[in-house]
Amino acid sequence: MSLRKVKLIQGEYFHIYNRGNDKKVIFKDKEDYDRFIGLMYACNQVDSFKIDNLQKDEGLFNVKRQNTLVSIGAYCLMPNHFHIILIQTEDEGISKFMKKLLTAYVMYFNKKYERTGSLFEGKFKAEHAGNDRYLKYLYSYIHLNPIKLIDRKWKEEGIKNKNESLKYLNQYKYSSYLDYLGENRVQSKILNIDSFPKYFSSNKSFKDEIFEWLLYKD
């Protein structure tokens, strides 16, 4: 078994991500996105639970939790990959959380689409966000990912339509972007914002930061 290059240290911040095998789609419809998002909440606990008892994805947010494995600061799901910013709150919390999350989602996905075998490209990837500059940048990088779905080369060539891009972000429900804008929704239960540095003093300061990066060009 290969060892992970990045050591998942207690009390440190990490960017966790993975994609589908051969870059294949891992979220095919709204139900798939909703299931993964619900599992991000329900699987974040030391105790085990039976997903089969939950009739709908909304029920995952009603799971009673006590001790969590990680604190999640931000996330974004894309058709063939995902990003999560987190910090572990229990010993080996990140590994335990990701094992629960990905195992539960693969079981759901394989059953729904009548398939077998692995879904993701090996073990999840981890990058240590060891300084404020990089960690703060990750909030913009992750939340701006959906723009690629309507403007694939916006980073290299510059944004084509600023208003259209912002409108798309405001309608994209599969990230924590709307939670940082202050929208009241059940998905906000996933986040533990108080466990992370206070980079954004208000919803507006967060939006301004995103807007600044949106206008950035490589």
Image (cartoon, rainbow, N blue to C red):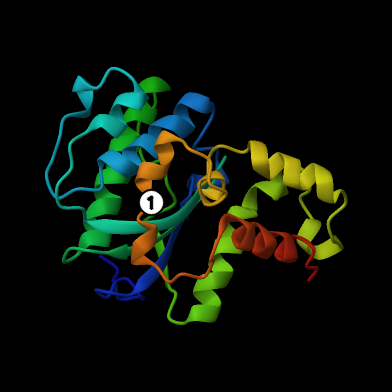
Q: Quadrant of residue 150?
A: top right
- Of residues 37 and 21, the one nearer the viewer is 37
Vertical placement of 102 versus 61: above or below? below
Residue closer to the observer: 65 or 129: 65
The residue that label 1 is drawn on is 191
| Residue appearing at x 32%, y 38% in the figure | 39
Q: Position of residue 143 (x, y in %)?
A: 59, 54
Q: Residue sitting at 31 percent across and 42 percent down?
A: 41
Total marks in image:
1
**How many neighbours does mark 1 have within 10 angstroms: few (below 14), some (14-19), or many (20 or more)?**
many
Q: Quadrant of residue 122?
A: bottom left
Task: Give the x, y percent position of residue 109.
Answer: 39, 29
Of 91 and 3, the residue lying toward us = 91
Amino acid type at mark 1: Leu
Q: Residue at x 48, y 46 (%)?
A: 21
Residue 197 x/y as whole percent: 43, 71
